[in-house]
Every structure is written in C-alpha cells, then in structure tokens.
Image (cartoon, rainbow, N blue to C red):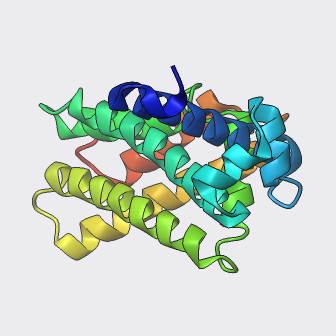
Amino acid sequence: MTPESKPRKERKQNADKRRQQLLDATLRSIAANGLAKTTLATVATEAGLSQGVAVFYFKTKTGLLTEALRAKYQEYENHWSAAINANSDNPADQLKALIDADFAPEVCTKESLAIWYAFWGEQNFTSEFASVTNEFDNRRSDAMAAVCRDLMQSASSEETARIAEWIDTMIDGFWLRLHVNADIYTREGAFQEVLMLVERLIPDFDLA
C-alpha cells in the first residue's frame, strides 16, 4: 500500500507522529545546544528523520522553533490548569497549587529552564516568539490574578492584580536563579520562599 493509498485517518496519525517527533527533537536540541546551533538539519537528525520531512512540515527554522515554543507552552499550561482545577473548592489551595506547579519536578528542570531562557532571550528579535509568549503568559497572569481576587474578596481589583504580579515576578526570579545557580538553589526551597512571600502579602493565606 502506498502512502497515498493509506486511509486518511492513518495518514493523519503518521503525520502527527512525525510532527511531534520533530518538535520533541527541537526542544532537546535547544536544551543541549541553544537556538543558534539548532537547525532543520540537526533537528531532523535528532528525530531520526530526513531534513526534507522537517522542511515539509515547518518550512523554515523559525517556523519550527515557533511551533516548538507553542508546544512547550501548551504542555506548561495544561499542567498549571490541571493544578487549579484539582483544587477548585478553595482559592488558598488553588494559589498554593499554582505556585507548586511552577516548581514541580516535571516542569522546573534544568532542560526546561534552558529552553525557556533561550526563547525569552530572542523574543525581542523574533516577533513570532513574542506573539506566542504573550498569548500564553497573558492567560497565566490572568489565572493568577483570578485566584488572588477570589482569595482577597475585600481588596480592590488593582491591589489583587498588583499582588498577583509580585508573586509571578518572584517565581520568575527563582526560575532565573535555578537556571544560573542550580548548585545553590533548589525547587523545594524556592517553593517555600514564594509561599512565605504570599503569607505576608495576603493575610487570609494559610501557609499550613
């Protein structure tokens, strides 16, 4: 049976599999080599596919990198969204779960941090990266702000938005420290430090 004669569903499954192979290989290459040394050729080799396959699905290096960034963000969003939904009855638990999600072992890894900072360092020069980053980061910021509003119902929307931004800024700061000084800082320690900040910012937050 030739590829053209395969059922449409099978062809789509094969295409999705190859596309995912290339995206996974791209992220591995970025973690190991950075963006500059990641090319369609090196990604294809990493994925065990031909460069022609990479060109067919993504056309250009920028197209490939942009979709890899989108896939990385979607994986991250699925993780923190699940953390919120699993604690929907209590905003304090939601906030703790949201922070914990950022320092979870499957999220806050050496490889993941290398990927994030590689992309963030280039977004001012590549509009495609900036567009994806803004789309996903805005939803994450909105989620943090919504949880803070639920927890601080007597506070103004301006105050809760400011506190949500402070919390996210501290998380970002610890991600950077874990990225450049992994021998000094730990995920567990960073998580506890952020919780201590929240306890001071939000009187109704229970650290226990």
Give the residue drawn at x 24%, y 75%: 158
**Looking at the picture, how far across and down is residue 48, in whole percent?**
77, 29
Q: Quadrant of the C terminus?
A: top left
Q: Looking at this view, is 188 or 77 the one in front?
A: 77
| Left/right of residue 59 with respect to residue 74 in the rendered view | right
Q: Is residue 35 visible?
A: yes
**Looking at the picture, how far across and down is residue 73, in whole percent?**
49, 49
| Outermost top residue | 1
**Looking at the picture, how far across and down is residue 152, in whole percent?**
18, 55
Q: Is residue 7 above or below residue 30?
A: above
Q: Looking at this view, is 43 or 76 the one in front?
A: 43
Give the residue drawn at x 86%, y 61%: 36
| Left/right of residue 169 with respect to residue 143 in the rendered view | right
**Looking at the picture, how far across and down is residue 132, in whole percent?**
49, 64
Give the residue drawn at x 70%, y 32%: 186
| Left/right of residue 148 with respect to residue 8 in the rendered view | left
